[in-house]
Each structure stands twice: as structure tokens, then as C-alpha cells.
Amino acid sequence: MGLKIFKYKKVVSTNNVAITKIKQGYKSGIIISETQTNGRGQYGKKWISNKGNLFLSMFFTINKKTKISNLVKSNLKSIKKILSKYVKLKISIKIPNDIMINKKKICGILNETLFYDNLKFIIVGIGINISNSPNFKDYPTTNLNEITNKKINKIELLKRIIKIFEKEIK
């Protein structure tokens, strides 16, 4: 399928850019940014977007009858599978949209739907802590470099994500 990639240095939110691209007529694509000034999480929460981590949103059309809950589960499982290539520790899914390692959040996924031009779109926003972790008093976080004691290649990780999602979209 070959999703078109849009790269940015800084955006407000990769999901917001995806919405803009849809309204510009794109049917699918991937938004990647080095930083977000106002990344969004589940239930209106803010996603802290420290430079060095991975922030992306994929968007594509789906059948109007597709159950979003099934897509959410599938997206979480796909990212968990990719992270398992890097980490030998137990990786768990915390419903509705977090991936945890050692009870610390390493990834959040924000799935949004949009009806536009008589089509139904899914936007899958993914944030993965690679090189640093936001500091929250409410819950612990971690990052891939810390867990693996290696410097994880962000481009390699991104390519794995794109590959698995392009396969699933087909």
C-alpha cells in the first residue's frame, strides 16, 4: 500500500495534523514529528512529548461497520509485538490504551475516528518513550533505552511499526 509519510520538526499534535491531511483529501498517511507542543492522550489528557521519543499518527479509511474496539485491541497487540523484539521483560497492556513494562508506562495509543467526505477514518496516534520518560507523580514511566541499556534506533523502530500496520491495513 505504501502509506505517504509526512515529517515535521514540531507540531501541536500529530493527530491534529492527520485530521488536517484528511480534510485536504488524503485517504491515508503517516504523520511523524520530533516534538509535539500539545500532544493528546486518552480522555483529554496531555501526552508529554519529550524530544528523542517517537510521536506518530497513522490514518486510513475503514469500513463504516468496523468495530473500533477491535481495532484498538489489534493496535495495542501490534505495538506490544514490536516492543517485544527489543525487550525481554514482560510487556502488558493496560486497557484502554497503554503499554506497560514492569508496571511502568512506555507507550500510549490514541485511536480517534473521523467521518469526512462520506468516509470513515481511523487515526492511530502512537507515542513511545525511547530515550526519556516523562516524570509523573500519578504513575511511573520508563523508556526503551533505560530498559535495554542500549540506544534504540528510532528510525528502525518506526520502520517496524509502518511495516506491521501496512500489512494489517491490507
Image (tube, grey):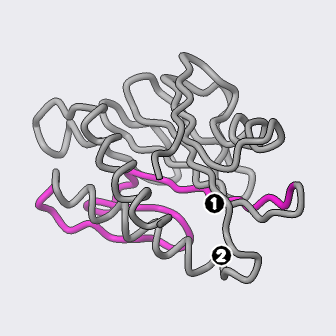
Question: Crowdedness of circle 2 by 10 Å Cα count: few (<14), some, many (20+)?
Answer: some
Residue 30: percent from left, percent from top: 54, 41
**Residue 73 lies within the magenta run:** no
Q: Nearer the viewer, residue 23 or 2?
A: 2
Tell me which label, 2 or 1, sits earlier in the chain: 2
**Residue 109 lies within the magenta run:** yes
**Residue that sits furthest to the top in the current view:** 9
Against 10, is 4 above or below? Answer: below
Residue at 71% of width from left, 42% of height from top?
26
Quarter of the view holding residue 131: top left
Against 6, is 143 above or below? Answer: below
Residue 100: percent from left, percent from top: 35, 61
**Distance CA(mark 2)–CA(mark 1):** 8 Å
Q: Are marks 2 and 1 in contact (CB under 8 Å)?
A: yes
The residue that disc 1 covers is 111
Against 102, is 13 above or below? Answer: above
Secondary element type, mark 2: helix
Q: Overall secondary structure of the magenta stretch?
A: strand
- Give left or right: position of 91 versus 60: left
Residue 6: percent from left, percent from top: 56, 29
Residue at 67% of width from left, 34% of height from top?
13
The residue that disc 2 covers is 68
Residue at 26% of width from left, 66% of height from top?
91
- Give left or right: position of 28 versus 79: right
Amino acid at the residue labelled 2: Ile
Secondary element type, mark 1: strand
Quarter of the view holding residue 153: top left
* Residue stretch in magenta: 87-116
Number of numbered callouts drawn? 2
Q: Which of 56 and 104 is in front in this view?
A: 56
